Image: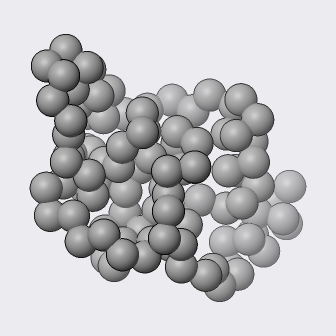
Amino acid sequence: MDFVLHQERRASRSPWKNWRHLPDGAMIAEGDKACLVFSGQLFAWTAAGYRANPAAKGGRFHLLTPPSIVAALSAGYRARFHASVLALATADRRTGVELPIC
């Protein structure tokens, strides 16, 4: 598995237009921003934790998560999530306000 993941991480990846079919826990990049797919939304990664990002550019994204990990997440593997993204997602559900996407 280590060999497969190493090869997947080194491989070049084509840009994608739609990230919405990715499972919770997948990471994508838009330009220089890394974003987490969680609960149907994107959350920007920062060193201080995840945050909702109102500066959405749209356009093309690159998958950062290796395809084998995406497959495991899609098959039902449950990732653990940082408290900052859980708090944002919980606040979104309580208020009914849609968070801006990355």
Where is residue 45 drawn, in percent x and y? Answer: 30, 54
Where 67 sits versus 57, above or below? above
Q: Is residue 47 in view from this perspective?
A: no
Q: Nearer the viewer, residue 51 or 15?
A: 15
Q: Is residue 70 above or below residue 98?
A: below
Image quadrant where residue 91 sits: top left
Query: Residue 16: x percent and y percent?
Result: 53, 72
Can you say which quadrant of the picture contains the N terminus? bottom right
Q: Is residue 41 above or below residue 86?
A: below
Could you tell me which residue is drawn at 76 percent across and 35 percent down?
A: 75
| Quarter occupied by the C terminus | bottom left
Quadrant hosting residue 58: bottom left
Where in the figure is residue 81, as x and y percent of width and height?
A: 43, 32
Q: Is residue 52 left or right of residue 75?
A: left
Residue in the picture at 19% in, 48% down: 100
Q: How many marks?
A: 0
Is 88 left or right of 30, judged from the image as shown? left
Tell me: residue 88, above or below residue 43.
above
- In the figure, residue 66 lies in which quadrant? bottom right
Residue in the picture at 81% in, 59% down = 2
Depth check: 60 or 85 in front?
60
Where is residue 85 shown, x and y percent of the image?
A: 30, 35
